[in-house]
Image (spheres, grey):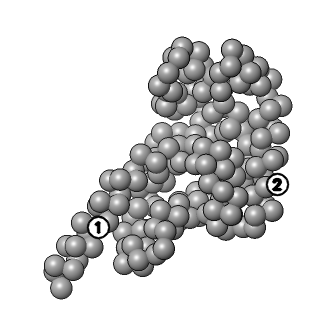
């Protein structure tokens, strides 16, 4: 009995260690704050650990965990309907810096994009993050969000339209071939 529990614990630890950076990135993009992202990933992994036998035997454990994280984020957002989980200042926004090119300009562009992303409603933000940062298909994003493909398409389109309407943001994307 103890050997099975130890094997399950090792399997969970291996999964968690391998997925931690990607889970943190997704959580950061959803919450907009480093500490909130850490809390979200930690609470998600706590839930997953309790149910690891079921999660580990799922067809796609990573998709299962992503769905748990999206649900946890949605629950937090519903509890704080008036206070969206967006940073109050710039302190948590510049943690990820791209690897190539002019680092200062890229950090500024990334900061502007993250600020704009933080202004989107939760469902639009989730759709944009899952479709364009996580590079999930519409079907995978719909499964992660617990909604229809049409809802993902609609929320992603509205979110992208709002991001394009942010003054100065569209110019940074098109200047000098930067993305």
Q: What is the quadrant of the C terminus in the image?
A: top right
Residue 155 placed where, x, y %? Answer: 78, 53
Q: Is mark 2 on a helix, strand or loop?
A: helix
What label does residue 55 carry, if any?
A: none
Q: Residue furthest bottom?
A: 1
Left of 139 or right of it: where is 13? left
Residue 169 placed where, x, y %? Answer: 74, 25
Question: Callout 1: few (<14), some (14-19), or many (20+) C-alpha neighbours within 10 Å?
Answer: some
Q: Is residue 118 visible?
A: yes
Q: Name the residue under label 1.
A: 11
Q: Which of 48 and 90 is in front in this view?
A: 48
User: Dividing the picture into quarters, in which one does residue 176 lie?
Assistant: top right
Question: Callout 2: few (<14), some (14-19), or many (20+) C-alpha neighbours within 10 Å?
Answer: some
Q: What element carries label 1?
A: helix
Which of pointers 1 and 2 lies earlier in the amino acid sequence?
1
Q: Classify 96 as above or below 177.
A: below
Marks 1 and 2, how far apart at CA? 38 Å
Residue drawn at (53%, 64%), measured in percent from left and top? 63
Residue 31 placed where, x, y %? Answer: 58, 45
What label does residue 154 carry, if any?
A: 2
Q: Classify 70 as above or below 131.
A: below
Q: Nearer the viewer, residue 161 or 27?
A: 161
Residue 35 placed where, x, y %? Answer: 46, 42
Residue drawn at (83%, 31%), measured in percent from left and top? 165
Residue drawn at (66%, 57%), measured in percent from left and top? 137
Residue drawn at (55%, 31%), measured in percent from left and top? 93
């Amino acid at each position: 009995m103890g050997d099975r529990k130890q094997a399950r614990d090792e399997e969970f630890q291996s999964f968690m260690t391998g997925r931690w950076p990607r889970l943190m990135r997704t959580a950061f993009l959803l919450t907009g704050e480093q500490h909130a992202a850490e809390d979200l990933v930690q609470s998600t992994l706590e839930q997953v650990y309790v149910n690891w036998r079921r999660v580990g035997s799922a067809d796609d454990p990573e998709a299962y965990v992503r769905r748990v994280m999206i649900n946890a984020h949605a629950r937090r957002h519903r509890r704080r309907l008036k206070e969206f989980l967006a940073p109050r200042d710039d302190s948590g926004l510049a943690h990820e810096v791209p690897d190539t090119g002019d680092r200062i300009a890229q950090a500024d562009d990334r900061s502007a994009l993250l600020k704009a992303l933080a202004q989107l409603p939760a469902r639009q933000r989730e759709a944009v993050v899952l479709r364009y940062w996580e590079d999930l298909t519409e079907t995978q994003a719909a499964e992660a969000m617990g909604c229809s493909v049409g809802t993902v398409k609609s929320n992603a389109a509205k979110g992208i339209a709002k991001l394009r309407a942010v003054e100065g943001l569209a110019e940074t994307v098109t200047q000098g071939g930067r993305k």
